[in-house]
Image (spheres, rainbow, N blue to C red):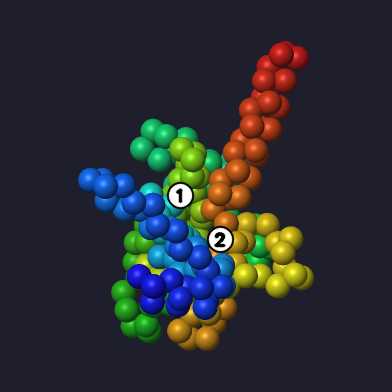
Amino acid sequence: MDVVRRNITALRGSIEIDSEEGFGATIRVRLPLTLAIIDGFLVGVGNSSFVVPLEMVVECVELSQDELKAAQGRDQLNLRGEVLPFIRLRELFDMPEPAAPEPTVLAEGMPEVDAELAFLLQPVLRENVVVVNYAGRRAGLVVDALQGEYQTVIRPLGAVFNGLQGVAGFTILGSGQVALILDVPGLVSRVSRRESRRASQINHLAAVD
């Protein structure tokens, strides 16, 4: 244990050991944020990647076209009877909208297809929702792609980016690309405040009527 303590101290961290006879021991290790390793879930928006702390991920669902239309302008999703408020990372970080996919073109000589089949042949833009939970509150993060679990080292943001909302740090992916690590507690609080304001406005309008 002395060797472990020396190594942690050399990394500018600390270790605390609380032991009680017959009940075992509790070991607390604290390391600088620059050395913190987390299990994350990697997602993509456009050409950018983001990391969501895995311990806060509840599930991932794909939004159907009907659900996309129903949620338009409301930022809420009916998830198996539960009203789930969500936030689009593309809008949060002011990222450009994706280009529309190229339509399917039938090769020359192929028979004509009816309108319904032609519609089904057209590619669609898909969106996914990562459902996260913090302190008993759930929210959805809308992304383009789900890229899987990813263990990573958290690096702190520089002073210039300290005010960037929704971000806890960044990491460097194996490809060399920079990925932002999302501040899930901050995002959930942001969504909760938005929903509280919306509820207050509705109650005010109801009182006026």
Cβ–Cβ below 8 Å for labels 1 and 2? Answer: no
The residue carrying pointer 1 sits among few (fewer than 14), some (14 to 19) or many (20 or more) residues within 10 Å by Cα, namely: many
Q: Which residue is mark 2?
A: 182
x 68%, y 17%: residue: 206
Label 2's element? strand
**Residue 111 in the image, given as x and y percentages of width and height:** 31, 74
- Circle 1: residue type: Val
- Circle 2: residue type: Leu
Pick the front one: 153 or 58: 153
Most distant residue in the left direction: 22
Q: Quadrant of the N terminus?
A: bottom left
> Looking at the image, can residue 126 be seen?
no
Residue 198, image quadrant: top right
**Residue 56 in the image, given as x and y percentages of width and height:** 43, 52
**Residue 172 in the image, given as x and y percentages of width and height:** 53, 80
Q: Which residue is mark 1?
A: 132
The residue carrying pointer 2 sits among few (fewer than 14), some (14 to 19) or many (20 or more) residues within 10 Å by Cα, namely: many
> Looking at the image, can residue 10 be seen?
yes
x 62%, y 70%: residue: 156
Instruction: Examine the rendered structure and indicate whether residue 40 appears above or below residue 183.
Output: below
Q: Earlier in the sequence, mark 1 or mark 2?
A: 1
**Residue 137 in the image, given as x and y percentages of width and height:** 49, 39
Q: Quadrant of the C terminus?
A: top right
